[in-house]
Amino acid sequence: MADNVLDMASSQLGSGGIDALAKALNLPAGQGEAALFSGVSYILAGMLNRASSKTGMGYLFNLISESDALDLADFASAVSSPEKVTSVKSIGEKMLDKIFSSRKKEVLEVATNNLGKEGGDLLSVSAPIVTSLMQSQAKAQKMDVSDLASFLIGQRDHLKGYIPDNLLEAMDVPDLGKLGEALVTHGHAKPQEPRATAIQGTEEKRKPVSFSSWFFPLLLVLVVLYALNMCMLKGKEEKSESNPSMTSQEASFMESASQPVGDSPLEKEKLEAQLGPDDFSNNLRDYLSSFSQSPNREFPMRVNFEKGTAKITNPSAADIDALAKIMQDNPNLSIAIEGHVKGEGNEIAEQEISQERADVVKELLLQKGIAANRITATGMGSAKPVPEDMAEKKEQKAINAERISVRIVTNSQE
């Protein structure tokens, strides 16, 4: 069972922070902890409901990852003056818009009816507290969207007794058991086990290896390689004597013959069509056949869209054909397609575009005969920047934040 965020909130704020919360909300002494549990529970319920769609989960991941965290160990200082309390409430108000979305008004009415006139303020203060706790967990455990989704759904059991029926009704949820029921975990449910361990089990203790058992075979190999190298050098010398080198004019002619003919260069898409699927197919096949795998590795696809839309400009892209072929060759393989954008505009709109783009690629794979239950499509918005191993090749491969990438979810055909 996941760690209890309610207990984490109480532990990190401590008695001093809880008393400061009660004072900031003008609550009677001794009611701080009950108020904290109620506020945190309402926020967690809202997050579970918001995360019940793939787009919502990605959007929530952005909120938790990018928000400025409170120092919960010194929460009393964060609300030590009316100005600071107002600042925390202001931040929380914006978070409530993102967490409860169109249901915010109804939820605030429920909070006021159930918790008193301070109910709305309690939620505004609780939102930054919960977000800070979730961010702390995400960083400490290096969570991706899948991990965060699993952690969040694990909170539902801890909310029993804290979520009133009228709050569920305000969020259009039939009962607590249905809260977050449609929550989709993205990518891996758990990291794949390295193939060597998965196949062989626990490795037996190896016996000591003697010096002679490896030195003499190695020496023999080196001698053979040396002999082969000498033969190759001798062959090159004989060839250079029998074939005089080309003149500079001949060399120039030979070089020019390999260049595109005409006044303008080949268009990028035509050139890509000639070059084939770049490194995508080879890299993915190498990964599938390797013994050691990084479960969160991305494989970027050369799929292009019109700017600011999900209209694909190269639906017959070689990488899509290559991916379909790989999935046909590996019937137990399932994948996650992730859409990414730069994050330079409206967050909600860009989240939706990234989801639509991922859906487009999924649909193209479905048209090629790949079963729907083998593919998940997720819009990540701008939540995941270019991984470091891809950033080094960004200029050569034209890889940037605006991309479609593939991750392996399961590959049971070991």
Image (cartoon, rainbow, N blue to C red):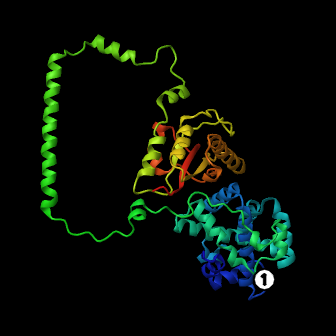
Residue sitting nearer the eye, 409 or 312? 409
Q: Which element type, helix, strand or loop, lies under badge 1?
A: loop
Q: Residue furthest bottom?
A: 30
Residue 137 image position (x, y, % from top left): 57, 69
Is residue 412 positioned above or below 87 on the image?
above
Q: Residue at x 71, y 72 (%)?
A: 126
Determine which residue is flagged by label 1. Answer: 27
The 10 Å Cα crowd at callout 1, few under 14, some 14 to 19, many 20 or more, is: some
Does 170 sit left or right of 295 as displayed? right
Residue sitting nearer the eye, 151 or 341? 151
Q: Residue at x 23, y 69 (%)?
A: 207
Is residue 162 positioned above or below 57 on the image?
below
Residue sitting nearer the eye, 266 or 74? 266
Question: Is residue 116 in view from this perspective?
Answer: no
Q: Which picture quadrant has residue 123?
A: bottom right
Residue 326 image position (x, y, % from top left): 51, 44
Q: Residue furthest top?
A: 249
Looking at the picture, which amino acid does disc 1 mark?
A: Leu
Count of numbered circles on the image: 1
Is residue 367 positioned above or below 7 on the image?
above
Question: Is residue 55 in view from this perspective?
Answer: yes
Q: Residue at x 61, y 58 (%)?
A: 186
Residue 85 image position (x, y, % from top left): 72, 71
Quadrant holding the N terminus? bottom right
Q: Which picture quadrant has residue 206?
A: bottom left
Does 110 sit left or right of 145 as displayed? right
Residue 103 image position (x, y, % from top left): 82, 62
Does 27 sit left or right of 211 as displayed? right
Q: Residue at x 60, y 72 (%)?
A: 71
Is residue 249 positioned above or below 343 on the image?
above
